[in-house]
């Protein structure tokens, strides 16, 4: 289990994270979301031991990532991993094997063959997506107990994303790995992660099951015989509203059935419930709090 207690960290004079408290159970895929600058990459660097916290602690089964015994179980893939000008995938594997002697070369080569990557090619000549594929294969070959991924889907085509997600799920099932993945691709996280945590204003605003959280919001389109007015919805728990003449679209915080009963009291001519996904919910929720217009 990962335990984060009272975690506070600043970069320069700016507080990036403040008083973070969370427990992440084993064998979990946790999505880490938030707007740009929310502190996702900083949190991953603190979890990996790259940064030491100003206050608080990070513990892996009671051990700090600063300890060698914990670091051997952790693999952190940043959004801009380092490689030298002469590095090839095979040389990269040999380099990392120094730190992770348990690495599985067969798994590394198999995944790169699926990606159609030249094992002896110079990585400086690869595209961004190809380099990302090499480092993903490397991370999976390590088979760590804890895998930390920063913008792991960035630069990947749809087929590569599917192969990656399938490999991550297999790793979690086979090795009981715990995965924390920060991504701007929220639609990728929705059908992939077990849980999520939302970073906002230096704190964790929400954590829990993605489906349950999306289910706590609902979206409707309504049509009225008379011109509509936003004031009609003043007593509703609004996250977002769009009024266009006789037509209104609303996103409400709450379960759909109670909201539907209240909306019917406004006597709409037509009312349809619309699907709401994790990414749309996130956008409306952030805008409601005034973090981004």
Image (cartoon, rainbow, N blue to C red):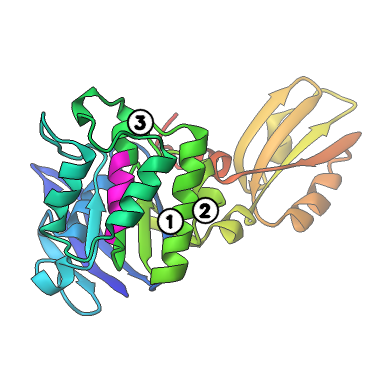
* Span highlighted in magenta in the image: 134-142
Circle 1 Cα neighbour tier, 10 Å, few/some/many (<14 / 14–19 / ≥20): many
Q: Are marks 1 and 2 in contact (CB under 8 Å)?
A: yes
Where does the image place residue 212, in percent across and percent down from the top left? 60, 61
Q: Identify the disc placed on residue 234.
A: none
Q: Residue at x 90, y 26 (%)?
A: 225
Picture quarter containing residue 151? top left
Where does the image place residue 152, in percent across and percent down from the top left? 36, 43
Where does the image place residue 175, in percent across and percent down from the top left? 38, 70
Locate residue 127 relative to residue 184 in the image: left or right.
left
Q: Identify the disc placed on residue 192.
A: 2
Query: Label 3, on which residue?
Result: 129
Quadrant placement of the C terminus: top left
Q: CA distance from mark 2 to mark 3?
A: 20 Å
N-term mark: 3 or 1: 3
N-term mark: 2 or 3: 3
């Amino acid at each position: 289990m990962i335990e984060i207690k009272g975690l506070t960290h600043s970069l320069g004079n700016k507080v990036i994270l403040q008083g973070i408290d969370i427990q992440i159970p084993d064998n979990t895929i946790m999505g880490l979301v938030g707007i740009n600058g929310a502190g996702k990459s900083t949190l991953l660097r603190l979890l990996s031991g790259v940064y030491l916290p100003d206050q608080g602690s990070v513990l892996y089964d009671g051990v700090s990532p600063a300890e060698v015994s914990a670091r051997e179980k952790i693999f952190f893939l940043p959004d801009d991993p380092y490689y030298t000008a002469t590095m090839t995938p095979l040389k990269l594997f040999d380099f990392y094997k120094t730190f992770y002697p348990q690495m599985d070369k067969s798994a590394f080569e198999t995944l790169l063959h699926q990606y159609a990557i030249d094992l002896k090619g110079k990585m400086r000549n690869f595209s961004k997506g190809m380099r990302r594929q090499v480092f993903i294969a490397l991370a999976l070959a390590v088979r760590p107990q804890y895998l930390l991924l920063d913008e792991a889907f960035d630069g990947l085509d749809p087929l590569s994303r599917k192969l990656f997600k399938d490999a991550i799920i297999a790793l979690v099932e086979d090795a009981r790995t715990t995965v924390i993945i920060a991504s701007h691709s929220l639609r990728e996280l929705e059908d992939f992660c077990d849980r999520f945590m939302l970073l906002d204003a230096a704190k964790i605003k929400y954590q829990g099951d993605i489906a349950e959280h999306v289910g706590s919001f609902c979206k409707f389109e309504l049509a009225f015989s008379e011109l509509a007015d936003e004031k009609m919805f003043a007593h509703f728990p609004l996250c977002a509203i769009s009024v266009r003449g006789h037509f209104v679209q609303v996103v409400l915080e709450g379960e759909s059935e109670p909201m539907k009963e209240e909306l019917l009291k406004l006597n709409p001519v037509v009312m349809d419930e619309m699907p709401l996904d994790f990414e749309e919910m996130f956008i409306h929720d952030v805008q409601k709090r005034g973090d981004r217009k």
